[in-house]
Image (cartoon, rainbow, N blue to C red):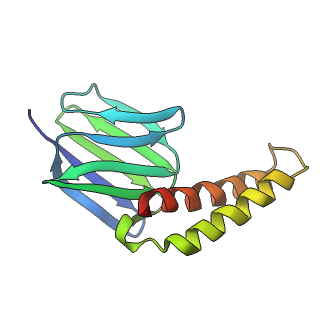
Amino acid sequence: MADVKLDILTPLGAVREGIEVAGVEVPGIQGELGLLPHHESLVTAVTAGVIRFKEGNKSVRIAVGSGFLEVKEAGRMVVLVERAIESGEVDVASATTERDEARKELDGYKASVDAPEYRALHDRWAWADAQVRAGS
């Protein structure tokens, strides 16, 4: 099976660039997207979560924040996210504490879920949860 070239980019630089993978799983706003070579071109939103793929024989998990995914016709997938961290770099204990604290605040939140404060709190929880899942 033909491989695709994968780029994972953040404002601070490339996490992976031009690596060849047989497929990749990306967290979308309506669930996980499984992408294989020869996928139709598309642009879609990415939500905080874990990107999974194989690099050689090694399974790789990278926690990512929100952003966008572009699948190009030329067999290239570009993930542009606000932040990303490799599974081996995650401080799971700190991320677990942060996730649990954010969850308690979300559970006790009484104002409108449309408020910017709620969105920021949810984003905080989602980023911490992505780190825990990538690092575990």
Q: Residue at x 14, y 54 (%)?
A: 57
- How many labels, in total? 0
Left or right: 71 in relation to 92? left
* Image quadrant where residue 87 sits: bottom left
In the picture provided, is 107 more to the left or to the right than 72? right
- Nearer the observer, 84 or 107: 107
**Residue at (26% x, 60% y) in the render:** 16
Tell me the quarter of the picture where residue 129 sits.
bottom right
Location of residue 99 in the rendering, given as x and y in whole percent from the top left corner = 64, 62
Q: Is residue 27 above or below residue 55?
A: above
Q: x%, y% of residue 63?
A: 44, 58
Is residue 32 shown above or below 5? Answer: above
Quadrant of the rendering where the N terminus is positioned: top left
The foreground one among 133 and 9 is 133
Position in image of residue 60 (x %, y %): 28, 56
Asked whether 30 or 13 is in front, the reply is 30
- Residue at coordinates 39% horizontally, 34% vertically from top-left? 33
57 on left or right of 61: left
- The single residue placed furthest to the top in the displayed view is 40
Quadrant containing the C terminus in the rendered view: bottom left
Q: Residue furthest right?
A: 110
Determine whether, in the image, residue 127 is placed left or right of residue 104.
left
In the image, farthest residue toward the left:
1
Above-or-below relation of 83 to 47 = below
